[in-house]
């Protein structure tokens, strides 16, 4: 719509600008944008293009100066401080898209609450790497879980240290606060009851997650004083500490409902203590060839079978516990390896389909072919 027609309409029919725009179905902003483009006789567009080219040259200098591609806010600040150019953040973002720039500034790790560079609070490496079955008292796992008791579901916390090979609970502690003192109390109980069982000639790994209690200087000093090697799970990967997670899951299945009936904290603590004692000395486990964790440790260290005979059959006539445990661990490793391979193939197939879109007809045929 031309300006002449607008004026003629206003003169003859008495319509104002808004009514004319509404009549022709044109927005006000669109009309003024069209007018500005039509009346750009001073070379305003060329001036804007030249200005943006100057800004982009300055952005290239900023990248050379910093050694990486910063974000839009950093560009905004550096253009103002170093080049005296006041460019909005949105414009910086638009120019970054135009230049195909993506910020690659190393970010702070929100999971560990620490920077990506090395410093005193950086998490150690995963040195166990899911290799739990090295030998008795070689790999010690630890974790913290929560429990609740009473009418108001009051929460308390349990910290456990577990031998990954014999599945025996070496030390534990409960507290109403999940702090470093809880981990220290469980560690002290482990060293008090089983400290002599750790050989000084072999390496012992203490594996945990990346909780702040395990990353503290106090806990690291405890490990250094006892010549233990610290190992930490990868972030967000519960499989790196799977035996510990499995113990907590089974324990809660057994006694969570009972602990919820405990009237006070002392009673709840007694229930936890009683369960762990029975777990070590009375719970027979399939993966330990039907032995309890404490029996299996005594057998592995002394070579003496817990019972001389079973229903009149001598223990020497039965298959060796070592052979049974080794075979079951081998089967478990094969099963896990197949599961990992299947998961990798599934991810590869999903990524392939995502990158290469399938036609609607082909997709339906693919679904029919792969639908069980």
Image (tube, helix red, strand yellow):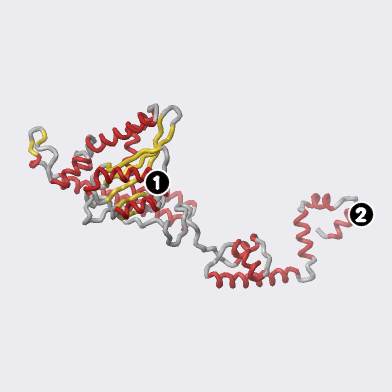
> Could you say whether the residue bearing mark 1 is in a helix, strand or loop?
helix
- Mark in front: 1 vs 2: 1
Which is nearer the eye, 154 or 184? 184
In this view, 118 is above or below 275: below
Gap in angstroms between the C-alphas marked 1 and 2: 84 Å
Q: Residue at x 33, y 46 (%)?
A: 142
In this view, 335 is above or below 307: below
Q: Which residue is mark 2?
A: 11
Q: Position of residue 232 (x, y in %)?
A: 36, 53
Q: How many C-alpha atoms fall within 10 Å of the one at disc 2: few (<14), some, or many (≥20)? A: few
Q: Residue at x 32, y 46 (%)?
A: 187
Q: Position of residue 3 (x, y in %)?
A: 84, 60
In this view, 240 is above or below 91: above
Q: Residue at x 34, y 43 (%)?
A: 185
Instruction: Name the residue at the right extreme.
Output: 12
In this view, 208 is above or below 308: below
Q: How many C-alpha atoms fall within 10 Å of the one at disc 1: few (<14), some, or many (≥20)? A: some
Left or right of residue 191, residue 182 in this image: right
Instruction: Assign the N terminus to one quadrant of the image.
Output: bottom right
Q: Which residue is mark 1?
A: 180
Instruction: Assign the C terminus to one quadrant of the image.
Output: top left
Which is nearer the eye, 143 or 171? 171
Q: Position of residue 236 (x, y in %)?
A: 41, 50
Left or right of residue 129, residue 66 in this image: right
Which is nearer the eye, 272 or 35? 272
In the drawing, what numbered circle is on residue 15? none
The quarter of the displayed image where residue 6 is located:
bottom right
Left or right of residue 309, residue 289 in this image: right
> Could you say whether the residue bearing mark 2 is in a helix, strand or loop?
helix
Residue 42 visible to an observer of this rendering: yes
């Amino acid at each position: 719509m031309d300006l002449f027609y607008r004026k003629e309409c206003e003169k003859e029919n008495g319509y104002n600008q808004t009514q004319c725009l509404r009549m022709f179905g044109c927005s006000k902003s669109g009309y003024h944008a069209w007018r500005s483009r039509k009346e750009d006789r001073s070379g305003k567009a060329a001036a804007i293009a030249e200005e943006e080219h100057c800004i982009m040259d300055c952005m290239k200098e900023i990248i050379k100066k910093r050694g990486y591609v910063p974000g839009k806010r950093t560009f905004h600040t550096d253009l103002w401080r170093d080049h005296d150019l006041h460019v909005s953040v949105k414009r910086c973002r638009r120019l970054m898209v135009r230049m195909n720039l993506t910020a690659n500034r190393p970010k702070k790790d929100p999971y560990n609450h620490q920077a990506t560079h090395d410093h005193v609070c950086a998490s150690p490496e995963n040195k166990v790497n899911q290799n739990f079955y090295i030998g008795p008292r070689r790999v010690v796992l630890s974790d913290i879980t929560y429990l609740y008791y009473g009418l108001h579901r009051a929460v308390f916390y349990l910290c456990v240290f577990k031998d990954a090979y014999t599945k025996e609970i070496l030390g534990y502690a409960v507290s109403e606060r999940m702090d470093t003192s809880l981990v220290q109390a469980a560690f002290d109980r482990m060293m008090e009851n089983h400290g002599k069982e750790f050989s000084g000639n072999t390496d012992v790994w203490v594996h945990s997650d990346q909780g702040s209690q395990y990353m503290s200087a106090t806990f690291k000093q405890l490990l250094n004083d006892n010549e233990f090697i610290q190992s930490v799970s990868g972030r967000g990967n519960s499989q790196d500490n799977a035996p510990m997670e499995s113990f907590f899951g089974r324990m809660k299945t057994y006694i969570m409902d009972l602990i919820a009936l405990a009237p006070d904290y002392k009673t709840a603590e007694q229930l936890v203590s009683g369960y762990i004692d029975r777990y070590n000395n009375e719970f027979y486990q399939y993966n330990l060839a039907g032995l309890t964790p404490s029996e299996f440790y005594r057998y592995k260290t002394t070579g003496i079978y817990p019972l001389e005979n079973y229903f009149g059959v001598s223990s020497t006539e039965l298959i060796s516990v070592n052979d049974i445990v080794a075979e079951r661990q081998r089967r478990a490793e094969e099963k896990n390896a197949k599961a990992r391979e299947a998961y990798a193939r599934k991810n590869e197939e999903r990524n392939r389909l995502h990158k290469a879109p399938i036609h609607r007809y082909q997709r339906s045929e693919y679904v029919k072919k792969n639908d069980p």
